[in-house]
Amino acid sequence: MTVSTGSTPKLGDLNNDAKVDGTDYTIFVNDFGKTGSPGFIHADLNNDGKVDIFDYAILVENYGK
């Protein structure tokens, strides 16, 4: 489910609900290890074509914001 608040998206907010929380973490875990074209999926937070530990670091840095 995607919720749009009309505000600027937060880095790590994978479901667009204006906060980085457990729901975003769950989405990230489900996408971890996937590869493809840069930006292929929201969980590729640094747009390098893979969902990995570097994306996790971005998620953790913004968690709770």
Image (cartoon, rainbow, N blue to C red):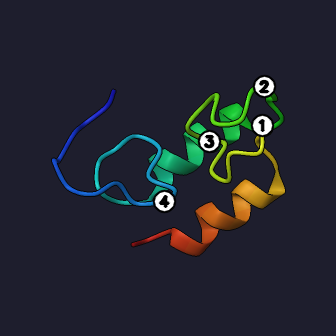
Task: Identify the mark nearer the N-term, 2 or 4.
Answer: 4
Task: Identify the mark nearer the N-term, 3 or 1.
Answer: 3
Residue at x 82%, y 56% (from the top left corner)? 53
Q: SS of the residue at dot 3? A: loop
x and y percentages locating residue 16 in the rendered image:
34, 44
Q: Could you classify mark 4 by the number of other residues whose Cα lies within 10 Å: few (under 14), some (14-19), or many (20 or more)?
A: many
x and y percentages locating residue 18 in the rendered image:
29, 56
Residue at numbered disc 2: 36
Residue at numbered disc 1: 49
Give above or below for 32 relative to 54.
above
Give above or below for 63 relative to 46.
below
Q: In screen coordinates, is 50 left or right of 59? A: right
Q: SS of the residue at dot 1? A: loop
**In front: label 3 or label 2:** 2
Mark 3 and 1 residues: CB-CB less than 8 Å, in contact? Answer: no
Amino acid found under the numbered disc labelled 3: Ala
Residues at marks 3 and 4, CA–CA distance in whole angstroms: 10 Å
Give above or below for 39 relative to 54.
above
Residue at numbered disc 3: 43
Amino acid found under the numbered disc labelled 1: Gly
Residues at marks 3 and 1, CA–CA distance in whole angstroms: 10 Å
Give the residue at the far left of this rendering.
6
Q: In screen coordinates, is 45 left or right of 48? A: left
Mark 1 and 2 residues: CB-CB less than 8 Å, in contact? Answer: yes
Residue at x 16%, y 48% (from the top left corner)? 6
Residue at numbered disc 4: 11
The quadrant holding residue 28 is top right
